[in-house]
Amino acid sequence: MSQAMIPEARDAIPVHRLLPALLATAVARLLILLKPRRIRSVLCIARHGAAPATAHQAFAARSAVVAVSARCAGEGCLQRSVATALLCRLHGVWPDWCTGVRTEPFRAHAWVEVDGQPIGEQHGAEYYRRLMTVPGKPRSSQGPNELRQRRRSDATKPISEAEELA
């Protein structure tokens, strides 16, 4: 996207975490070539059945993705966010995946968040206006029918409609 940044520090990760991080990063590299609507559809399918991610799980996934990919450590926020979400999914959890913009100065960005807080990002939740999200399972006490209906409506909403997370 268009956020100028200095590449993040790329720490070494244990060997047992290397292969899943490389796999998630490679799949994300292919997914970001799709149209935004298709990316969202694929991520909506991928999140199915996942538990909500904790901030620690999401940060660990983000750190692993950054460690294995120079693009994800630099300006590749879309690939980094998709890879982070996919790596979380490989571990059975899902963070909220978001894209958004800022108008002054113009910047577009993609990130993951947990409980409304961006994970590993410089700016807070209000810095960007969310345009597209793929939220994880809500932490409320909704029954399976309400969750199923919410997922269907999330997948069919037009991408131009801004979604505000509560």
Image (spheres, helix red, strand yellow):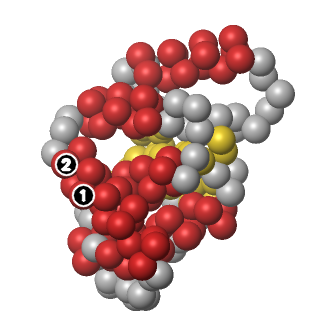
**Residue kind at label 2, given as amino acid type:** Leu
| Side of 153 relative to 55 (left or right) | left
Quadrant housing the C terminus:
top right
Q: Does residue 82 sit above or below 149 in this rendering?
A: below
Labelled disc at residue 30: 2
For the point 39% across and 62% down, the residue is 20
Give the Cα separation between the discs numbered 1 and 2. Answer: 7 Å
For the point 64% across and 35% down, the residue is 137
For the point 69% across and 51% down, the residue is 115
Q: Residue furthest right?
A: 141
**Residue 153 image point, x, y percent:** 51, 16
For the point 32% across and 75% down, the residue is 68
The quadrant where residue 3 appears: bottom left
Quadrant housing the N terminus:
bottom left
Secondary structure at numbered mark 1: helix
**Residue 57 image point, x, y percent:** 61, 62
Q: Does residue 105 sit above or below 17 in this rendering?
A: above
Q: Residue furthest left?
A: 33
The residue tagged 1 is 26
Determine whether label 1 and label 2 are within 8 Å by CB: yes
- Residue 3 shows in the view: no
Q: Does residue 35 sit above or below 2 in this rendering?
A: above
Q: Which residue occupies the foreground of this view, 103 or 13?
A: 13
Labelled disc at residue 92: none
**Residue kind at label 1, given as amino acid type:** Ala
Q: Residue furthest front?
A: 16
